[in-house]
Image (cartoon, helix red, strand yellow):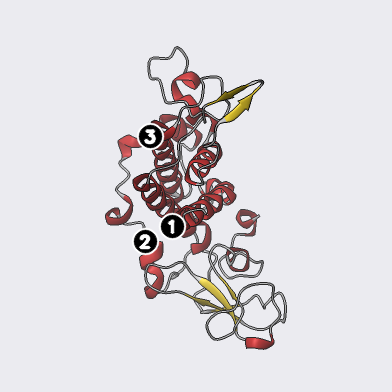
């Protein structure tokens, strides 16, 4: 049975991968003027140094600055750099703790080598980008490939060991912080000032309401109640509710005030 922390961490890593393209696109998109988020949800979407750690100017990769010499959205650029650095560093840490894969194994995470003759080799597996790093971390979190394997007529040792408890919780911490950064940029200017979304429930046409609590991600609830037949779970009062990140498509639906439809695509 998989560790509950591991399952939630894997979900967060998938959310980061799925919305990574939107985050990169946001770097070239000026942020819209909005008063979102409301006070009670700012703790979840906050990017303060106390939660995530300050991102220093000297930590910015020169390649990223060359790609975006005049970024339209500095918050989005900082979020990209923060998420990349955190996930890359996490992959390094997990590989050092549990990796036994052979050098030619495609599942292996390769560490950076500053002394390598070319930039791509020097970057190691980081050269493959955020998606590969997140997939690698997810595999370690879910304890994939931790059993001996049959290679021809020979039984060889597992390429990875199960992740120890401390590493599971470190991965959970990093995944949560990175998901928050992605959520703040991708969803923040798509959510209107009003608690009621202009987009109706996709099942019954009822009103959809944004709800949030301190240090928790936003959720969307249908006001129709028990009569709504939407394909999602019910909350404690029997209403259909979309948790994070399932609620994100509703928050980014066309017609939402302040939304840039090109970015949402």
Q: Mark 3 = which residue?
A: 97
Q: Where 129 sits versus 228, above or below?
A: above
For label 1, the crowd category at 10 Å Cα-Cα, with few meaning under 14, some 14 to 19 and many 20 or more, is: many
Q: Mark 2 = which residue?
A: 46
Q: How much space separates mark 2 and mark 3, taking CA atoms?
A: 31 Å
Query: Horizontal and vertical percent for residue 33?
Result: 47, 65
Question: Does the residue at mark 2 contact the one at mark 1 (Cβ under 8 Å)?
Answer: yes
Residue 224 shows in the view: no
- Give the label, 2 or 3, closer to the camera: 3
User: Of helix, strand and loop, which one carries label 3?
Assistant: helix
Query: Horizontal and vertical percent for residue 210?
Result: 52, 76
Tell me the residue at 49%/70% (across/down).
218
- Give the label, 1 or 3, closer to the camera: 3
Mark found first going from the N terminus, 1 or 3: 3
Q: Where 2 sits versus 104, above or below?
A: below
Q: Mark 1 = which residue?
A: 180
């Amino acid at each position: 049975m998989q560790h509950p922390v591991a399952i939630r961490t894997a979900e967060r890593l998938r959310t980061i991968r799925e919305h990574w393209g939107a985050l990169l696109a946001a770097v070239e998109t000026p942020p819209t003027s909005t008063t979102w988020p409301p006070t009670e949800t700012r703790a979840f979407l906050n990017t303060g140094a106390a939660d995530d750690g300050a991102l220093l100017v000297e930590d910015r990769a020169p390649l990223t600055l060359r790609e975006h010499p005049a970024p339209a959205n500095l918050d989005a650029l900082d979020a990209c750099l923060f998420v990349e650095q955190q996930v890359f560093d996490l992959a390094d840490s997990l590989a050092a703790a549990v990796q036994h894969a052979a050098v030619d194994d495609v599942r292996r995470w390769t560490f950076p080598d500053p002394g390598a003759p070319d930039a791509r080799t020097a970057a190691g597996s980081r050269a493959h980008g955020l998606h590969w790093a997140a997939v690698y971390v997810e595999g370690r979190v879910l304890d994939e490939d931790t059993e001996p394997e049959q290679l021809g007529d020979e039984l060889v040792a597992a390429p990875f060991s199960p992740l120890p408890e401390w590493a599971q919780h470190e991965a959970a911490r990093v995944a949560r912080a990175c998901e928050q950064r992605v959520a703040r940029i991708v969803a923040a200017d798509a959510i209107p000032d009003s608690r009621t979304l202009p987009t109706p429930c996709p099942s019954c046409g009822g009103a959809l309401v944004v709800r949030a609590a301190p240090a928790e991600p936003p959720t969307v609830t249908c006001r129709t109640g028990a009569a709504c037949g939407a394909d999602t779970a019910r909350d404690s009062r029997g209403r259909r509710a979309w948790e994070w990140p399932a609620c994100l498509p509703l928050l980014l639906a066309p017609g939402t005030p302040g939304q840039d439809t090109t970015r949402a695509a």
